[in-house]
Image (cartoon, rainbow, N blue to C red):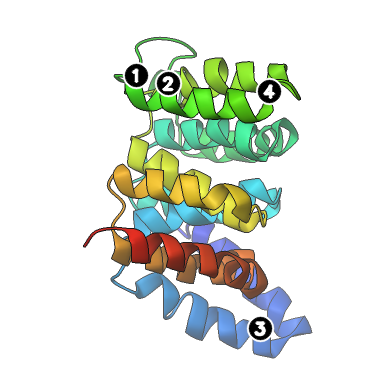
Amino acid sequence: MESSESRHIVSMTDDMHAVSPALERYTNDVLLGDLWKRPQLSARDRSIVTLSVLIARNQSSEMPYYLNVALDSGLKPSEISEIITHLAFYSGWANATAAARATKAVFEQRGITADQLPPAAGNRLPLDAAAEAQRDAAVAQNFGAVAPGVVQFTRDALFLDLWLRPGLAPRDRSLVTVSALVASGQVAQLTYHLNRAMDNGLTKAQASEVMTQLAFYAGWPNVFTALPVVKDVLEKRPD
């Protein structure tokens, strides 16, 4: 039986062939034939990056294909659920809602049920209290008088709750955040979150290849806007 991924590729390339044969060639030869086969980043990690871009940019029409690729590459339904939840905070609630709608159909097709998903509440990962206190104090000092509500929710909802949810490893949660920031052109937050990603286990080589993956899915301008920040972070990190 033909898989949904195969049907999507056939439909996608048929559309391209009818409109832009050059785009069809680049898709087959460069995107699928080269980029996704590069060994510097696993297919699972490439799926995390790509899904994060699609959610951050509200491009849910492409999500069914890449959700199936992600699941076939070892990303768990529970991890996909957490990626959507995480990006509600970093890309907006409407984008996460649209992603949930697209994902629901794929989960139903694959027989994925609620017992495979992380609970709404429960245990949390250990907190680095000193690092969190330092982060919270800096944000409160800079913005507490301007937007105390933002400071409160940043502390209570994001860093004392969302970031401690065990359904997604801290390294992967950071990878989601970095990908969404680059995809949205939000480089002001990139230094902090890329350093956090590498503190959480992302290597320099992987960070470099993440930018390569993002060039195709977020566009070259967004990546070149981010590269000076990435260069600065990587040069200052110890080997």
Instruction: Residue at 31% x, 62% y: name it.
Output: 204
The residue mark sitting in front, 3 or 2, is 2
The image quadrant of residue 167 is top left
Residue 9 seen in the current view: no
Amino acid type shown at disc 3: Leu
Instruction: Residue at 67% x, 53% y: name it.
Output: 184
Q: Are marks 3 and 4 in contact (CB under 8 Å)?
A: no
Give residue 66's position: percent from left, percent from top.
Answer: 52, 55
Label at residue 150: 4
Badge 3 or badge 4: first in the primary sequence: 3
Q: Quote the CA–CA distance across marks 3 and 4.
A: 43 Å
Please indicate whether residue 21 sits to the left or right of residue 226 in the image. right
* Disc 3 crowd, CA 10 A, few/some/many (<14, 14-19, 20+): some
Name the quarter where the C terminus is drawn: bottom left
Question: Which residue position is annotated with label 1?
Answer: 129
Q: Residue furthest top?
A: 122
Instruction: Reply above or below: 108 against 42.
Output: above
Q: Quote the CA–CA distance across marks 4 and 2.
A: 16 Å
Badge 3 or badge 2: first in the primary sequence: 3
Instruction: Residue at 51% x, 35% y: name it.
Output: 107
Amino acid type shown at disc 2: Ala
* Disc 4 crowd, CA 10 A, few/some/many (<14, 14-19, 20+): some
Q: Quote the CA–CA distance across marks 2 and 1.
A: 6 Å
Amino acid type shown at disc 1: Ala
Label at residue 133: 2
Badge 4 or badge 1: first in the primary sequence: 1
Q: Quote the CA–CA distance across marks 4 and 1.
A: 20 Å
Which is more toward the observer, 74 or 209? Answer: 209
Q: Are marks 2 and 1 in contact (CB under 8 Å)?
A: yes
Q: Residue furthest front?
A: 141
Circle 3 SS class: helix
